[in-house]
Structures are given as structure tokens and as C-alpha cells.
Image (spheres, rainbow, N blue to C red):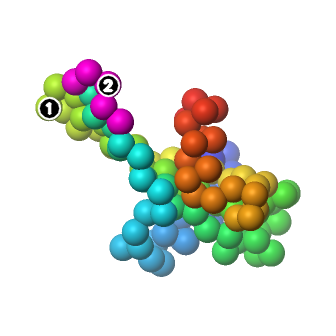
Amino acid sequence: MKDNQPTLKQDILAIWEAEPGSPPQAIQANKHGGRVEQRRLWVSDILVGYSDWPYLAQVCRLERSVTRKGRNTQEVAYAVTSLSPQQANPWQLLTLWRAIGE
């Protein structure tokens, strides 16, 4: 989700502001040499019927944390998908997200 859709992005941000301590629904951790990566994904279908975004079935929040040589970087990204919860669960969405290059 880019900043060129401010209304949709605000709606998505509001989901996780309402439940800031909710546990992630999918977690992946990988080690590559001295690099440790962790991805945590949250998914919701609460905006279906509320948002007029075409084909919206779920929205996602992905937190990426990378530690390399003692230095940690973190990033948060958001996405929408037309895949329903029956078509793609959080683990499948995380795998798809990684496959398209984050």
C-alpha cells in the first residue's frame, strides 16, 4: 500500500491501532550467514463492505526486522488482496508476499 491512497491507508492503519497488542497471525524467521530476518503478518477482512476499494477481500500488515552485524532495521508495510480468507490464510499470504519480492 503506497501513500497515494491516503484514505485506504488510514482505514488500514486504524485496524491495528484499535488492537495494538494483537498477536501476529504468521511469523517467519530466516538466517542467511550473519543476517537474521523476521517477518510478522497480521490479516483482517474487517474492511470488506466498508471500503469501496475494488475487489478488496483482506488487508495485511507486515513487520520486517533485519539484524546484521549487530545493527537492527525495522519496516512496516501494508497491502490489500482480492484473496478471501478461504482462498489464502495468513501463512499463504506471507509466502505470496515474499514471492513477489515484498
State the image quarter where residue 97 is shown: top right
**Which residue is more in the foreground, 15 or 65?**
65
Judge from the rendering whether residue 36 lies leftward or rightward of residue 15; answer left or right.
left
The residue that mark 1 highlights is 70
Left or right for 93, reference 52: left
Is residue 8 among the parts visible in the rendering? no
Q: Nearer the viewer, residue 11 or 29?
A: 29
Instruction: Tell me which residue sits at (55%, 71%) in the image.
Output: 15
The amino acid pointed to by label 2 is His
Quick one: which residue is furthest to the left in this view? Answer: 70
Disc 1 marks which amino acid?
Answer: Gly
Q: Which residues are magenta?
A: 30-34
- Residue at (67, 74) in percent of width and height: 46
Q: Is residue 31 visible?
A: yes
Residue depicted at 47% across the width and 57% down the height = 26
Tell me if residue 91 comes above or below residue 17 in the rendering: above
Looking at the image, do the residues carrying marks 2 and 1 touch, with CB atoms under 8 Å apart?
no
